[in-house]
């Protein structure tokens, strides 16, 4: 499985292990949505440090998760975006709606705690 | 020693086949007299005090390789092999301190040595000499340019690398305190520098785990659309890595440029001067207080 | 002497291969890591257009040389339904449509040149190019 989802306190932490196909992105999205509901998580951290490319589909999927989570009163934080990927996303004009971003897992937890 | 020239030397009508035959003849001549001509060239290099950083043995072996490549290039009309050799040679001799004028000088000396040899051989027949030179000159000039350009390109690459190192030293990203970085930019910005600054900034955010960055552009006189684009990207990319950006020293002129370029200024927080920017950054950081179970001390107002 | 990689696009797994190949080639010709990411991202978008709209196609990734500059060209071909109004799509008129528009828009932002030829019912070819030298300093960062 290319993504692991762990529970920590009332947060979920999803770590992407490698480059994802679109199918795997959909699986991740669906898994996050169902796990958040199941555990009534207050926050989700998605660690995308292993992604060499974040394109429009990944952005859209992350935003979908975030918007849905918002309706459930949960925050979504994306962490670990690589510098090159950040520049590419900025050049492309991709935005992560409803998503908060932090540097890494630790910063993400601080954000959720704060 | 006289050679029989088989082509119709006295005929005024010359087609490309004759030129090809002439080229073959002159290449044969250059190969036949290889030792003598190479030696003469070597001697003239030393007389002109060129390539003084190289030992005589080194000069001799390079001279041999260049001579053979030169004649091959004349024969085939292709400078590819010569180009590859010139690039390789440049990589080796530039660190030794060989300069552009030396390389050009050496190549032109070879051209002259070979030309004189042709003069000597064909001097009795002006008509034929002219035709031989017509065949030789463009090829020889092209070769000289190829070698010269290869050398200059390699030099330029080395210089750029050095400039890069200097740039990195002169535009540091400063860690002021935990989670706060300052990037003071001084001087004119071009696209190259802007890209480099963006990379340094993002790596600085990662290494220092910065949450706020103050970019001070007091020292930047003006920016164009490409640089403005890079600035916007730097702000966005920093955000994606969890760092907010405060711009300070934004002159009225640059602000106007950004507005005219359609840049959304609301995405950038702007504060008048660097000091004000740092204070604002500290304020923002003190709101995001760390509250971990192991470290109860957190109130630092 | 052409250095060329061909990737058959038949599923989204092939998209990953294509963009990784794009990155490898981009780095090999001396583009910076950032530019290589631009190329990989553009390929990801264009490959998706193929799988979503045409079902299958092919992506060719090639190193090119033109008057002394080196670059990478990506040619994405499919025999899908084609695009009726290429200009409109490139102008990003379909701004809210999560389809062809986004992908080609992204490719235009990330690559130096993007050319789209398409015929309804016959197929589409997207040719995109990125040149070295635009960021020579960045490329040198890789070597240092």
Image (cartoon, grey):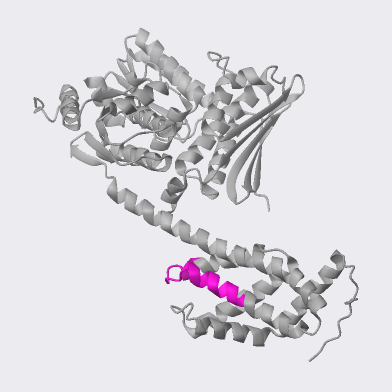
Tell me if I can see residue C100 in this picture: no
Q: How many marks?
A: 0
Left or right side of A110 for C10: right
* Quarter of the image where the C terminus of chain B is located: top left
Q: Residue at x 57, y 41 (%)?
A: C21
Residue A85 position within the rendered picture, expressed as x and y whole percent measured from the top left: 43, 34
Which is nearer the eye, B141 or A28?
A: B141
Magenta stretch contains residue A73: no
- Chain part drawn in magenta: B91-110
Residue B26 appears in the picture as rendered: yes
Residue B243 falls left or right of residue B301: right
Q: Residue at x 37, y 51 (%)?
A: B164
Q: Is residue B60 above or below residue B77?
A: below
Q: Is residue B92 magenta?
A: yes
Look at the picture and state if C70 lies above or below C99.
below
Residue occupying the point 61% across, 31% down: C114
Pinpoint residue C111: horizontal percent, then vertical percent: 55, 34
What quarter of the picture does the N terminus of chain B occupy? bottom right
Q: Quadrant of residue A113?
A: top left
Give the side of residue C77 with respect to residue B258, left or right: right
Picture quadrant where residue C54 is located: top right
- Furthest residue to the top? A71
Q: Is residue B172 left or right of residue A25?
A: left
Asked if B252 appears above or below B38 in the picture, the reply is above
Residue A68 in picture, x, y percent from top left:
40, 11
| Residue B63 vertical placement versus C87 (above, below) | below
The residue nearer to you, when weighing B217 against B166, is B217
Residue C55 in the image, given as x and y percentages of width and height: 68, 24
In this view of the protein, which residue sits in the foreground, B134 or A95?
B134
Majority secondary structure of magenta residues: helix
Q: Residue furthest bottom?
A: B1
């Amino acid at each position: 499985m290319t993504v692991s989802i762990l529970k920590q306190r009332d947060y979920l932490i999803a770590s992407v292990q490698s480059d994802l196909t679109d199918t795997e992105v959909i699986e991740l999205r669906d898994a996050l949505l169902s796990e958040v509901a199941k555990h009534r998580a207050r926050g989700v951290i998605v660690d995308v440090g292993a992604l060499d490319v974040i394109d429009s589909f990944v952005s859209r999927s992350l935003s979908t998760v975030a918007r849905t989570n918002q309706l459930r009163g949960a925050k979504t934080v994306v962490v670990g975006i690589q510098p090159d990927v950040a520049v590419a996303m900025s050049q492309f004009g991709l935005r992560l709606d409803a998503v908060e971003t932090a540097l890494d897992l630790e910063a993400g937890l601080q954000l959720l705690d704060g | 020693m006289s050679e029989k020239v088989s082509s119709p030397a006295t005929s005024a009508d010359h087609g490309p086949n004759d030129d090809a035959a002439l080229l073959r003849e002159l290449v044969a001549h250059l190969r036949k007299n290889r030792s003598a001509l190479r030696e003469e060239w070597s001697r003239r290099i030393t007389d002109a005090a060129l390539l003084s950083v190289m030992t005589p043995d080194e000069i001799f072996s390079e001279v041999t390789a260049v001579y053979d490549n030169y004649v091959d290039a004349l024969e085939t009309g292709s400078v590819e092999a010569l180009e590859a050799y010139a690039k390789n040679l440049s990589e080796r001799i530039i660190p030794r301190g060989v300069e552009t004028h030396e390389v050009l000088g050496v190549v032109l000396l070879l051209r002259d040595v070979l030309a004189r040899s042709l003069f000597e051989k064909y001097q009795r027949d002006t008509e034929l000499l002219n035709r031989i030179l017509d065949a030789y000159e463009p090829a020889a000039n092209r070769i000289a340019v190829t070698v010269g350009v290869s050398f200059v390109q390699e030099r330029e690459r080395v210089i750029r690398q050095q400039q890069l190192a200097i740039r990195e030293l002169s535009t540091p990203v400063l860690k002021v305190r935990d989670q706060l970085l300052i990037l003071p930019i001084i001087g004119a910005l071009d696209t190259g520098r802007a890209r480099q600054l963006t990379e340094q900034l993002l790596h600085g955010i990662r290494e220092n785990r910065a949450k706020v960055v103050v970019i001070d552009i007091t020292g930047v006189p003006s920016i164009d659309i490409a640089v403005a684009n890079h600035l916007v990207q730097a702000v966005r990319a920093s955000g994606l890595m969890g760092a907010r950006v405060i711009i300070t020293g934004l002159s009225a002129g640059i602000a106007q440029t950004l507005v005219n370029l359609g840049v959304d200024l609301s995405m950038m927080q702007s504060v008048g001067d660097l000091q004000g920017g740092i204070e604002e950054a500290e304020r923002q950081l003190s709101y995001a207080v760390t509250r971990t179970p192991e470290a109860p001390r957190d109130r630092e107002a | 002497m052409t250095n060329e990689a061909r990737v058959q696009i038949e599923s989204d797994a092939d998209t990953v291969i294509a963009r990784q190949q794009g990155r490898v080639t981009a780095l090999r010709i001396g583009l910076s890591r950032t530019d290589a990411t631009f190329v990989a991202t553009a390929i990801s978008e264009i490959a998706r257009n193929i799988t979503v709209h045409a079902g299958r196609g092919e992506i060719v990734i090639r190193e090119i040389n033109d008057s002394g500059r080196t670059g990478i060209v990506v040619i994405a071909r499919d025999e899908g339904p084609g695009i009726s109004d290429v200009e409109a799509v490139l102008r990003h008129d379909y701004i809210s449509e999560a389809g062809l528009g986004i992908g080609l828009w992204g490719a235009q932002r990330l690559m130096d040149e993007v050319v789209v030829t398409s015929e309804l019912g016959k197929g589409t070819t997207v040719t995109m190019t990125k040149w070295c030298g635009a960021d020579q300093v960045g490329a040198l960062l890789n070597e240092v």
